[in-house]
Amino acid sequence: MIEFIAQNMAPIMFASLIIFLLIGYPVAFSLAANGLMFFFIGVVLSPYSGGSINLAWPLLHALPDNFYGSRVMSNDTLLAIPFFTFMGIVLERSGMAEDLLDTIGQLFGPIRGGLAYAVIFVGALLAATTGVVAASVIAMGLISLPIMLRYGYDRRLASGVIAASGTLAQIIPPSLVLIVLADQLGRSVGDMYAGALIPGLVLTGIYMAYILIMSIVRPSSMPALPLEARTLGHGVLSLIAALLVTIAVSYAAYRYLAPAHGDNADILGATIGVVLIYIVAIADQRLNFNMMSRLAQQVIIVLIPPLALIFLVLGTIFLGIATPTEGGAMGAVGALLMAAMKGRLSLDVIKQALASTTRLSSFVLFILIGARVFSLTFYGVNGHIWVEHLLTSLPGGEVGFLIGVNILVFLLAFFLDFFELAFIIVPLLAPAADKLGIDLIWFGVLLGVNMQTSFMHPPFGFALFYLRSVAARVPYLDRLTGKQIAPVTTGQIYWGAVPFVCIQVIMIGLTIAFPQMVMHYKGAAVDPGTIDIQLPDMPGLSPLGAPPADGGAPANGGAAPAAPANDLSQPPNFGDAPPAKPSPPATDLSQPPNFN
C-alpha cells in the first residue's frame, strides 16, 4: 500500500488540491499548504517510490529564490498588472462609462435593440481601456440596466448582455488575464495581445449578431428608444460628414508627410485628422457655431479620448515603441489626465484606486507564491511527467488534445476563478502543448477565451455576482417615468447568461478551426528564395567565387608584382647571383644498382 501511494503521489496530490478548493479554503493558502504537506510526505515515502519521488529536505532552500527570483517578486511582466488595474479603476471613477453609455445609447436608440448594441460597443471600449471585468460589469449594470428596464427590455436579455459585455475585458487587450497567461507560458505579452485582438473583436461581432437575430425573432424583447428619450435629437448625417472630413484631412496629411516620415506618416496623418475634428467639435459646442448637430458633437467629444487612450496603450505596444509595463504606466497617467479634464479627479478617487489596485495585486502575488510552493513539490513527484503523458496520449493528436483540454478547463471554470486556472492548470498544460508542436500564443488565447466562461457560468460566475450586487432586488419607482419597476431575480440573471456562454463555446471552436485569427501575430512568412544578400564593395578583393583578376592582380586594376620562387634547399641569398645548381649524374640502367 505504501509503495502504491508513493508511486502515485502526483494524482493524489492533484486530487487533494481540488478537494481543498471545493471545501472553500482560500486558493493561495490551499496551494501552499498542499505543497508543503505533500513535500513532507514525499520525503518520507521517497525510499518506497522506486525513483519516482525526487524530494529531499535541502530542496526547501530553493523556495526563497523562487519567491524573490524572476518568477514572482522580480517579475517585470507582472508589474503591468497594477498599472492596468489602476488605470481601469480611475477611468471607472471618472464617469467615462456613464458618458459613453448615454451617448452611444442615443446614437443607436432609434433602432430595435439599440441599447443592447450600445452596451456591447461600450463593453468592448471599456475592455480596451480598463481591462478589469468587475469595473465594466458594475459600471454598465448601474447605468444601463435601469434604462433598459425603463423602456421594456426583457430582463434576461438585458442582464445577459451586460454580464457578457463586461467579460470582454477578459480577452480584449489590455486584459490582465492575458498578462498572466503570457507569464505562465513564457511568451511575450505583446505577442499575446496581438494574437488576442482579432478573436476579441470577432466575439464582439457575434454578440451583436445575436442581438440582431433576437430583434427579428422577438422584437418585443428589445424596443427602440421612444422619441422623448432621445435628448440629443437627430444628427447622424452630420456625424457621417464629420467622419468624411476627418478621413480627408488624415489622407491629405499622410500624403504631405509621407516623403519625410515614411512608414510613420499614416499614424501621424490620422492623429492630425482626429485632433482637428476633436478641436472643432469642442469649439462648436462651446461657441455655438452650430456647424454640427448636438449628437455629432457629443459622440466626437465622448468617443475620441478613450480611443486616444487605447492607442496610447495598445498602439505603442503593437508598434514596438513601449513594453506592456511601459504601456500600462502611460495608460495610468492618461487615465489621471482624463479624470482631471472632466473635473472628477480628487484625492478620494486616487485613494480608492490605490486601495483596489493594492488588493488585486496582493491577491495575484499571494496566489503566485502559493503556486510556486505547490509546483516545487509537484515537479518533485514527477507530476509534470504524469500530466504530460496523460494529455499527449489522448486520441486525435493535436485536435484531440485541444478538445480535451478545453473541456477540462470549461468544467473547472464552474468552480475556479480565472487567476486560479491560470496559476494552477496552465503550467501543467503548457509542456504537453509544446511537445505536440502547438504554438503557445495560440494555445494561450484559446485558454483565455475559454476562461472567459468562468465569469458567466451559473451559479459561480463572478460577472453574475457583480451584476447581482447592483441589480434591483425589490420593486422601485423609476425617477423619470414614476412607474413601478419590478426587480431582477437571480434566476433571470442566470438564464440570461446561458446564451452568451454558448456563444463563447462557439468562439472556442472557431479559434481552433481558424488558427490564423491568432497566428497573424507572427507576420507574413518570409520566402528564403527572395532573400538577396548584398555585400559591400571591398577594394583589393575579388568577388566571392570568382578567380583573382588578371591572374592574381588586384581587382582594382593595379599591377601585382610576381613573387619570386624561393628554393628552401639553398642558403639564403641577399643579393648575389645564385650559384649554379649541379646537374644530377646520369643513371646507367644497364648495370645493377649500387647501394654504396
Image (cartoon, helix red, strand yellow):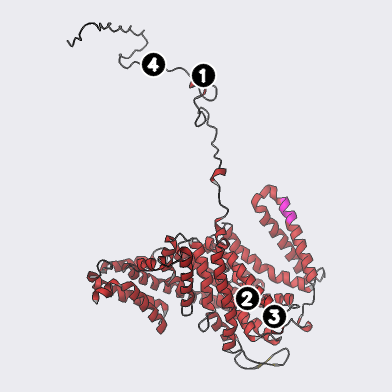
Q: Nearer the viewer, mark 3 or mark 4?
A: 3
Q: Earlier in the sequence, mark 3 or mark 4?
A: 3
Q: Which residue range is magenta in the image? A: 251-256
- Return the residue at label 3: 217
The numbered dot on residue 559 is 1
Mark 1 crowd level (few <14, some 14–19, many ≥20, 10 Å Cα): few
Q: Quadrant of the N terminus?
A: bottom left
Mark 2 crowd level (few <14, some 14–19, many ≥20, 10 Å Cα): many
- Return the residue at label 4: 565
Q: Quadrant of residue 291?
A: bottom right
Which percent across, then down, holds residue 123?
A: 62, 74
Q: Nearer the viewer, mark 1 or mark 4?
A: 4
Q: Quadrant of the C terminus?
A: top left
Q: 500 or 197, which lies in front?
A: 500
Tags 2 and 3 touching, CB below 8 Å? no
Q: Quadrant of residue 117?
A: bottom right
Question: At label 1, which amino acid type do we have?
Answer: Ala
Q: Residue furthest right?
A: 290
Tags 2 and 1 touching, CB below 8 Å? no
Q: Distance between the Cα atoms at labels 2 and 1?
A: 81 Å
Q: Earlier in the sequence, mark 1 or mark 3?
A: 3
Question: At label 4, which amino acid type do we have?
Answer: Ala
Q: Earlier in the sequence, mark 1 or mark 4?
A: 1
- Return the residue at label 2: 94
Which percent across, then down, holds residue 231?
A: 77, 80
Q: Distance between the Cα atoms at labels 2 and 3?
A: 38 Å
Which percent across, then down, holds residue 236?
A: 78, 71
